[in-house]
Amino acid sequence: MNKQNFDKNYKIEDLHGTKVPVIKKKYYEKELKNLQIELVKLQEWVKLEKLKVVVIFEGRDAAGKGGVIKRITEALNPRVCRVEALPAPTPKEETQWFFQRYVAKLPAAGEIVLFDRSWYNRGGVERVMNFCTEEEYREFLRSCPEFEKMLIRSGIILIKYWFSVSNEEQEKRFQDRMNDPTKRWKLSKMDLESRSRWVEYSKAKDEMFAHTDIKQSPWYVVNADIKKHARLNCISHLLSQIDYKDLTPEPLTLPPRQEDTGYIRPPIDEQTFIPQIYGKPQPD
């Protein structure tokens, strides 16, 4: 990458403790636009070939999962690509087979489903916060790889991302959310609790990887300390995981507008308009 695309005056320390220059906003926006165009091409290929794609986004709180998901879906058709972020299970769901409520959200042919957290809740928050028993947790570690192999054998393309963020960067993002009224809703009591259990979450993640980072469905780790880099790198990698073709149609030609045949429309002042607070000329 050309050095002129980086901001030489702005560097962030990454997970390895190295000061890394951050790409410029203009370059980031240009590359993001290009990647989103490719995502649209991928979407059309998924529709045509009737593929079933599942992408899992996991990681620590404030690691940037939501930001990447937002940039992926921004230009896509919600009828083709949808996001699933399941809430805590209901009392009835707690009595069901653990994977049952996730199975109901899996894609049909021609669909992409992005899981903003997934069945891996059991390997993370449920484990650390004691929301499941030791027996339930051990059964999850045994059955999860088999469950995913079954999904793959059924024709589902399964891609798993883990967003890795440093302790210092997570602290910075938490503080930002606490001080920004538009982001404060992102901070839950569970998020705050996760800060006090950083080491326990690390142990849970490592054990989960030891059992579920398998050849058939490996974990792909995203270095998420620099949001711009994480977004571009993740989307670029996602595009590389599916061999798609460009189905962009030929340029369209708009038909001529229908001629006026003398139809008289009702007076415009009979309609109720919203107040024009913005865009209304102000007196000098």
Image (spheres, helix red, strand yellow):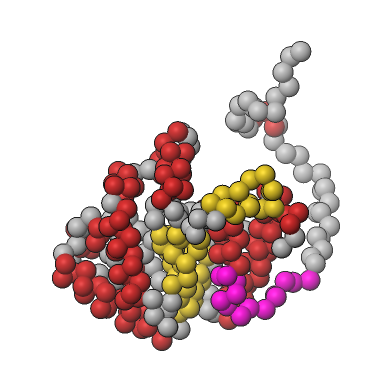
Q: Is residue 246 magenta?
A: yes
Q: Quadrant of residue 60?
A: bottom left
Tell me residue 261's x, y (percent).
Answer: 82, 48
Which residue ends up furthest to the top in the rendered image? 284
Quick check: 110 left or right of 34?
left
Quick check: 222 left or right of 251?
left
| The magenta segment | 237-250
Tell me residue 174's x, y (percent).
Answer: 42, 42
- Numbered disc total: 0
Tell me residue 264's x, y (percent).
Answer: 76, 39
Residue drawn at the location 33% of the way across and 79% of the way down? 145
Residue drawn at the location 32% of the way across and 53% of the way down? 198
Quick check: 74 left or right of 197?
right
Which residue ends up furthest to the front in the rendered image? 18
Q: Quadrant of the N terminus?
A: bottom right
Tell me residue 116's x, y (percent).
Answer: 42, 60
Q: Nearer the viewer, residue 225 or 250?
A: 225
Residue drawn at the location 36% of the way across and 64% of the way down? 118
Q: Quadrant of the C terminus?
A: top right
Residue drawn at the location 27% of the way across and 57% of the way down? 200
Q: Quadrant of residue 136?
A: bottom left
What predominant SS class does the magenta segment belong to?
loop
Q: Is residue 85 magenta?
A: no
Q: Is residue 280 visible?
A: yes
In the image, residue 135 sits, relative to residue 86, either above or below, namely: below
Q: Is residue 84 visible?
A: no
